[in-house]
Amino acid sequence: MFGLDRETAIIVALVACAVASYYIYTDLRKSKEDITKITKFLDSVTSEPPPDMIMRGAPPSAAVQVQSQQEVPSSDTVTNTSVQNSPK
């Protein structure tokens, strides 16, 4: 019928290696595409925050100015501090 000698075994092994190499190549190419998509997504997410998520500082009317008044310390009080809102 069909004899399995050394040359036939080598040919079968070469065909099996070629098929396995092609499968691994296509699988790695798909993985590379997936990783590229993920990195592009992460770059787009981390590059700029959405407009409603931009953090802003306190409005100028909320700024508080602290002034200390130095007086001669007595035994009861050491320093008086007063808090005033800054002008707009």
Image (spheres, rainbow, N blue to C red):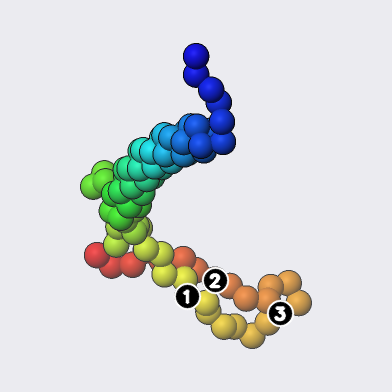
- Label 1, on which residue? 67
**Side of 58 where 15 appears, left or right:** right
Q: In x, y percent, where is residue 67? A: 47, 75
In the rendered view, tell whether residue 45 sits above or below residue 62: above
Distance of label 1 from label 3 (alpha carbons):
20 Å
Along the horizontal axis of the image, is 17 left or right of 59?
right
Identify the secondary structure beneath mark 3. Answer: loop
Closer to us: 1 or 85: 1
Q: Is residue 73 above or below residue 21?
A: below
Using the numbered discs, state the Cα–Cα distance from disc 1 to disc 2 in whole angstroms.
6 Å
Disc nearest the viewer among 3 and 2: 2
Which residue does the numbered mark 3 point to in the structure image?
74
In front: mark 1 or mark 3?
A: 1
Nearer the observer, 13 or 56: 13
Question: How many numbered marks does the figure carry?
Answer: 3
Mark 2 Cα within 10 Å, few/some/many (few <14, many 20+)? few
Residue type of the residue flagged with mark 2: Thr
Q: Are marks 3 and 2 in contact (CB under 8 Å)?
A: no
Instruction: Determine the residue located farthest toward the right in the rendered image.
Output: 75
Asked whether the beta carbons under mark 1 and mark 3 sit within 8 Å of each other, the answer is no
> Which residue occupies 33% across, 47% down?
36
Q: Identify the mark at residue 41; answer none if there is no mark.
A: none
Asked whether the residues under the numbered discs 1 and 2 touch, taking CB atoms below 8 Å apart as contact, a structural biologist would say yes
Q: In the rendered view, does 63 fall on the left or right side of 50? A: right
Q: Earlier in the sequence, mark 1 or mark 2?
A: 1
Query: Where is residue 25 shown, x and y percent of the image?
Result: 39, 42
User: Hey, what amino acid is under mark 1?
Assistant: Gln
Q: Position of residue 29 (x, y in %)?
A: 35, 42
What kind of element bears circle 2? strand
What residue is pinned by disc 2?
A: 81
